[in-house]
Image (cartoon, rainbow, N blue to C red):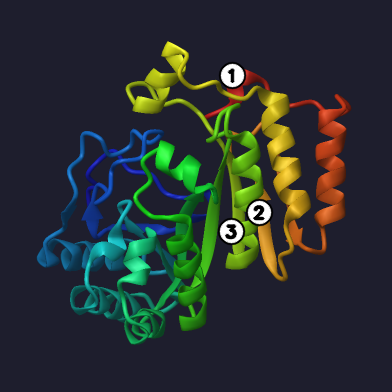
Amino acid sequence: MPLIEPIIRPPAEADSLLLQVTTGCSANSCTFCGVYRQKPFAVMPEVTVFADIADAAQDYPETRRVFLLDGDALAVVNARLLPVLDTLRASFARLSRVASYANARNITTRSDDELRELAAHGLKLIYLGLESGSQQVLDSCRKQATADEMVEAVRRADAAGIKTSAIVLLGLGGKELSREHVTDTIAALNRMQPRYLSFLSLMFIPGTPLAQAAKSGDFAELDAQELLQEARDILAGLELVRTIFRCDHASNHLALAGNLPTDKANLLAQLDAALAGETSLRPWFMRGL
């Protein structure tokens, strides 16, 4: 089952079977993302998807987790997606979870019944790029979904039985909008109450509009200390009831992991130590590896 490159998947899906249901991203407008700029969005032919499942069932019969590619697999309507989920369950006896990236409108344009159908047929987790809770920041980076739409998407998915891993992009507001980025992201996450939460740090992808803006001086990026301060400030303001937190992506200067709210004080202490220079940060050449 050859994959159409380039592909990305969440770090937590490193051991998952990758099944390409779509290629590219239907939005493909975010100024910071360069993954799919040369890869038009398309829905894979059904015959190809089912053939890939059959091949994988022969080669990897013990598969427990499947991740649906590419960046927008839930753009596929239920009438076509449910048979895929059913075939996965029938093909892998030990299957415990199917996950996918999702944009907010993949969720909000579906009815509650449609969302419950997806959960009942095996879709258990979606990864949603909140990036920022600030509408000003989202508009500046041309994110198509609004902050309110993303909050609604997470809450509706959760009510239907689908967990969400929300992703925050530290530094996305630059120096100019850092305060708005922090304050509004706290508010959005507290409304969302995501089951999983991860912080990534902004890295510039050559050729993207945001990288060009940084090069021309129109976007002032945050340094390591400022990124850590954003992480600390957002974390301090969170009032999450039951969330698994990770800040261990290669883009981050400091690796953190814990459960919220149980480990909040310890996580803040680690960030305070790093900000005080008491903890070694990842060297610049390791970021992004």
Q: Which tag is nearer the camera, tag 1 or tag 3?
A: 3
Name the element at disc 3.
helix
Tell me if label 3 and label 2 are in contact, CB under 8 Å.
Answer: yes
Which circle marks residue 188 in the picture?
3
Query: Would residue 96 appear left or right of 263 to someone viewing this image?
Result: left
Give, as a three-letter code, the residue at label 3: Ala
Q: Quadrant of the N terminus?
A: bottom left
**Rendering coords of residue 26 (x, y %):** 24, 51
Query: Would residue 187 appear left or right of 219 to someone viewing this image?
Result: right
Residue located 53% across and 60% down the image: 165
**Rendering coords of residue 125 (x, y %):** 47, 68
Residues at marks 3 and 2, CA–CA distance in whole angstroms: 6 Å
Which circle marks residue 186 in the picture?
2
The residue at which mark 1 appears reads as 285
Name the element at disc 1.
helix
Residue located 70% across and 47% down the image: 234
**Rendering coords of residue 93 (x, y %):** 40, 79
Which circle marks residue 236 in the picture?
none
